[in-house]
Amino acid sequence: MSRKIELLAPGGDVEAIKAAIVAGANAVYCGLDTFNARNRAANLSFDDLCGILRLAHQYECEVFLTLNVVILEHELPALFKLLNQLVNTSLDGIIVQDLGLFNLVKKHFPTLDIHASTQLTTHNEGQIHFLSRVGASRVNLSREMNLGEIKSLTALAHEHDMLTEVFVHGSLCIAFSGQCYSSSVSVGNSGNRGRCSQACRDEYEETAAGNKYPLNLKDNSAYFDLPELVDAQVDSLKIEGRIKGAHYVYTVVDSWRKQINQFVDTGKLLEDDTNLYKVFNRDFTNSFLKGNLTKDMFIDNPRDNSVIHAVDKQNAISVVQIQAVKQTLKADKNELGASLEDKIKYLNIDKMRLNLSFTGQLDQPFAIQARVETISNRLEQDNKIQTFSMQSDSMLRASDKSPLDKEALEKRFRSFNNADYVIQNYDFSGLSTGLSIPFKELTALKNKLAFLLNNSVDVIPPVELPKLEQHAKVNENPGLSLLICDEKDAHLGDVTDADIYFKLPESFKKNCDKYIELLQRNPRFIPWFPAVLIGKDYIEAVRILEEVKPARIVSNNTGVAYKAFEMGIEWIAGPFLNTTNSYALGTLQEDLNCAGAFISNEINRMQIRNLKRPAGFKLLYSIYHPILMMTSRQCFFQQTVGCNKPSIEDGCMLKCEKATTITNVKGISFAVDKQKGGYPSIYNDEQFLNLDVINDYSSLFDEFFIDLTDIGSGSKAKLDKVQLIEHFENLLLGSEDAKVQLDTMVTVSTHAQYKQGL
């Protein structure tokens, strides 16, 4: 397995990829115009991708394709068609978020290398085991990881023959990737579909701490942390920026290339990072990497900071001085741009030119000669010419039936006008008329030519998307389940037979048996594990499993899910695993013996309709819950109500229970909530209440779920939970009055996502 230091660059369009290549990237990641998580980037056509592969590989640069979004059921045929194309390219890997893709690729396209996207929120040991089992060859670790955590997870990944990559430069999300729904909730553009509208960069009403952009982080830069990353044995240093232009990509990649080369050659670092400030930036921080989450991570300006930095660095005060600094910066940028233009002007992704010549006489073999011209990407080199020749085993015979004439041969060989080749010319001058050979021989010659033109690699025949059956429900009539987070609500079990899930926190006091004893006292409680469990908190979550040995759990964290699978504990995939298609259900069941899954609340009525459950598999859906917008490892209170602590400490997670609101410029307020033992989170002002789904899909779902934790309710009045349970149970029995009662009780609600979908 490779242990080189890979510099992995973004490529939002062809020019940016060319810039990355000439700047010295070892690999680039890019997306097509579908199925990728940078919908706002220009992206590539399939023909562009094939041209990029030819170009990049000439420069020993690998290419990874982003398929890093959740996939909808109706999209799977188109996705499978694309995979059939990709498997016959020289692509070096695909970057994947959707769990269904892991199983499909592993079964049907095993030559495609799978990389786990940052959207999978990978941050603990169990998740490394999980991804290894489902077929990942490398994993992008969560940006929130510190160096110690990165080193530990990388060592474990290497034990499983997986590589790790870490984002070292570019924009930072304040929310855990894959766990941010703010854009989806606010404007219907989901980050899990590559359409994030960047609510964290939005302006809000000025907070008590005096900030108008309280969620806006500085950009990430680990430029001076290279020795520690090398010591952690990270395999790939990844630069963010697929919506950035070629100038940005060239400047950043070039700076990092020089830094890496300097360190490899001398063991020392370059001290000058000036060029990084000459392109778009929001100033820089390495606080996640250092594990020092201070107020300095924030900047109250989401726009380009390059001019401000230049002015501050030169101590420019007067109008004349400031103008001079701006002109110098502009000149520097123009010089960098001119240098880039000069370096890439000879690079092209043109298709290879193919000339086909057909010859043959009566009682002689039929012969084909293919002449391929590849246009050079280097000024000093001529175009490369290759010639391939082949002939039939049998002799040409006279025949008026299916003769090898111009029309027939052009029809048979026109498929070579494809993503890699353009047929420039057919030459029939050496072929006599009225002759033929057996059809199977002509087919064999065509296949041989396809093999040779595919770098002497067999063309993999297309695979059909496997059809799935709709298996019977586990429960004939859908039941109700509910979530609590306080033992004081245990009495709710006296008024209902519903399953009671108990929400465990995201942080635990080390070696504390509080939750072990709580679950042992309340054997009816089904443990509900959160989406994020880092370091000691994952270890403590595993200890709960080992000590309590519950009959079943719900897990929103794939690491805990893997541990449950390993222990033989029945587990249900929680709603924050973003499950949106039937093949994801198949991955969960086949690879990890999962017993059921919550279907994502981001998908709509029509997108749910064709889901097919595996045999003996439960489908669950949440009909009432606070709408989580984002969860962060950083503190939301430093920039809102203010906090006396300069940085987040271990005790903050366990002790802090602040709450406030932020209000955007449209006057909409959002609850900022911090539970004891939880990460800071932001919730929508409306509760999710979807009563329509019961009429629509009682025949599909085994269980409808309600969240009674009061988390994320902000300043809203607490509702009578016994009444809520009664009304929801009556609703499942068909009571129209119950619907009226619920609409009356839950006054601020929405189920817009069920209407708009992904």
Image (cartoon, rainbow, N blue to C red):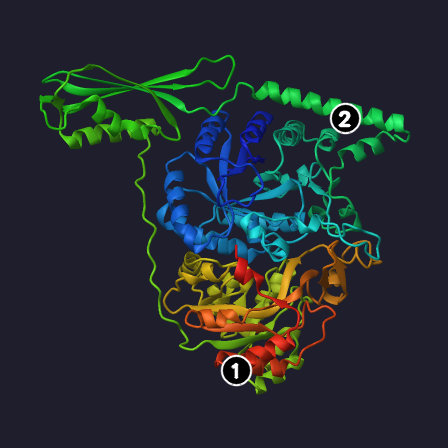
Q: Quadrant of residue 359?
A: top left
Residue at the spot x=57%, y=81% of the render? 727
Would you place residue 587 above or below residue 288 in this image?
below
Label 2: few (<14), some (14–19) or many (≥20) C-alpha neighbours in 10 Å: some
Label 1: few (<14), some (14–19) or many (≥20) C-alpha neighbours in 10 Å: some
What kind of element bears circle 1?
helix
- Most extreme residue toward the right is 318
Task: Please name whichever residue, 203 or 388, is drawn nearer the observer in this view of the structure.
Answer: 203
Would you place residue 369 above or below residue 156 in this image?
above
Cα distance between the residues tagged 2 and 1: 68 Å
Q: Is residue 677 left or right of residue 460?
A: right
Q: Is residue 747 something one can see in this rendering? A: yes
Residue at the spot x=46%, y=33% of the render? 49
Q: Is residue 399 left or right of residue 623?
A: left
Provide residue 364's location: percent of width, then percent of height. Answer: 12, 17
Provide residue 36's location: percent of width, then percent of height. Answer: 52, 44
What kind of element bears circle 2?
helix
Q: Quadrant of residue 517?
A: bottom right
Type of amino acid at the residue the image marks with label 1: Asn
Q: Earlier in the sequence, mark 2 or mark 1?
A: 2
Q: Is residue 524 something one can see in this rendering? A: no
Q: Which residue is denoted by mark 2 in the rendering?
A: 329
Q: Which residue is denoted by mark 1 in the rendering?
A: 730
Observer-side mark, 2 or 1, equals 1
Labels 2 & 1 near each other (Cβ < 8 A): no
Residue at the spot x=44%, y=42% of the render? 113
Type of amino acid at the residue the image marks with label 2: Leu
Q: Is residue 654 left or right of residue 727?
A: right
Q: Is residue 180 left or right of residue 615?
A: right
